[in-house]
Image (cartoon, coloured by chain):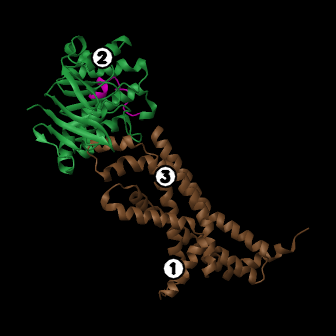
Chain colours: A brown, B green
Amino acid sequence: MSPDFLSDLPKLFTFYNILLWGEAALTTLLLSAVGCIIGMIVGFVLAIARQSRRRALIPARILSGLFVEIVRRVPFLITLMLFFFGAQVLGFDLAPLTIALIATSVISTAFVSEIIRGGLETLKPAQLEAAAVMNFTPLQTLRLVSIPQALPIVIPPIFGYFVLFIKDTALASQVGVLELTQAGKIMTTKGHSAFLVYAVVLALYFIVSYPLARLGGYLENRLVLSRHS
Amino acid sequence: MSFLDIHDLGARYGSLRVLDGIDLSVEQGEVVSLIGPSGSGKSTLLKVITGLMKPDRGRVTLAGAAVDYSNRKSLKAARDRLAIVFQQYNLFGNMTVLRNVTVAPTTIKKRNRRQVEEKARELLDRVGLGDKLHVYPDQLSGGQQQRVAIARALCLEPEILLLDEVTSALDPERVSEVLDTIRLLAKDNIAMLIVSHEMSFVRDVSHRIAFMADGRVQEIGSPEQIFDNPQTDRTRDFVGRISRVGH
């Protein structure tokens, strides 16, 4: 017995539909990649600011702490809506994709920053004392001692988070961004089999996120192996 | 003036006074040991000298220059002249043995890498770890890690070496290998300030011994004076007790 919905399969992949799927997959990839990259860079800076004990950096420490604690406690969708409607209220004429990119980057930054801060805190204070007595500057301590030791610890949770994060970018569909989930909605409203459509969406999410998970595994292995080979 | 001169040095942890007017000096090439009960301020004194803890009064002079612990430049200059070996070794876990020893001389002091590596290999050979250059600290025993820490400190070519209870974290059978290494150094004419509970070692290796209690130096003198003919009741009491427990 051949289910009826399978007959719908070729219609899902007409030329125009392939273009739509492609654009949606690229948008999901863009949202994920920008979120991950900005999250890593800014999250790292915030984690350092939160770790600093320098008096001059106290305001930065408090602000970054507040930012991370608030953003992590608010649902993704609410943050996205706040940015979306906030931009309208403040008179910024931004495309939904731009707003989604900013919101996802902000969220990713908060989560990654917290993971990196945790990793940096596993470092024994005595090693930092040893570095200080040998006249390492704070930046040298960070580059030569703290980061190399924190990296193998934070890479697995960061990449674990990124895989979850890619799925969260689906919420960008709520502000009208054409990403994979939104593409799925459009296809079902066009009358295609919803089951088939979402099976395709599932496959495309897998294709987007699997390489990232593999990259995380590769980096994790490399960092551990390079220490003990 | 002595190479290291400490006058009326005081420090506190919150409201608890841990150093209460330390007067102490170490000459060039001299080995001075600090003994005393736990909590007497021995390790704190090393922390203050190295700038890991700020003094609240008194003066430290190193090689004729007064150290201003609130001035980064002055502290850096002082730290350039000294090295410390910690009780818990404090090796960098992400670096091989060789890199642990060479990182500060090459990256921080900007010395010639090849010369530093040559010296590091020689020092590691000397502490019996010439075959462990490329292993990581967590692959070594405590005694081996401590010997790497000593080589690391020496590769900085310090004018004074501070040793903070370097054998307390070791298994008894590892203690002698570390103490033998330090004995060799003492013959090299390097100034040392040693905090130790190993009384026979201290007696053997020191030119002078300071007995500390309640954050003060209660008595300072030759090993013979401190162990055989102590001048104060506190010293006599301490030496009497430790000799009864078989140190």
Judge whether residue B123 is colored magenta: yes
- Dominant SS of magenta comes to loop
Q: Secondary structure at mark 3?
A: helix
Region in magenta: B122-135
Q: Which residue is mark 3?
A: A118
Q: Closer to us: mark 3 or mark 2?
A: 2
Residue at position x 49%, y 48% from top?
Answer: A152
Could you tell me the amino acid type at mark 1?
Thr
Pointer 3 or 1: first along the chain: 1
Q: Which residue is mark 2?
A: B237
Between B124 and B164, the residue placed more toward the observer is B164
Could you tell me the amino acid type at mark 3?
Gly
Q: Closer to us: mark 1 or mark 2?
A: 2
Q: Which mark is residue A98?
A: 1
Q: Name the chain under label 3.
A: A
Task: Kindly report the distance in space between the C-alpha atoms of the residues bearing marks 1 and 2.
Answer: 77 Å
Residue B218: % across, % down: 22, 25
Check the image and name the residue furthest to the right.
A1
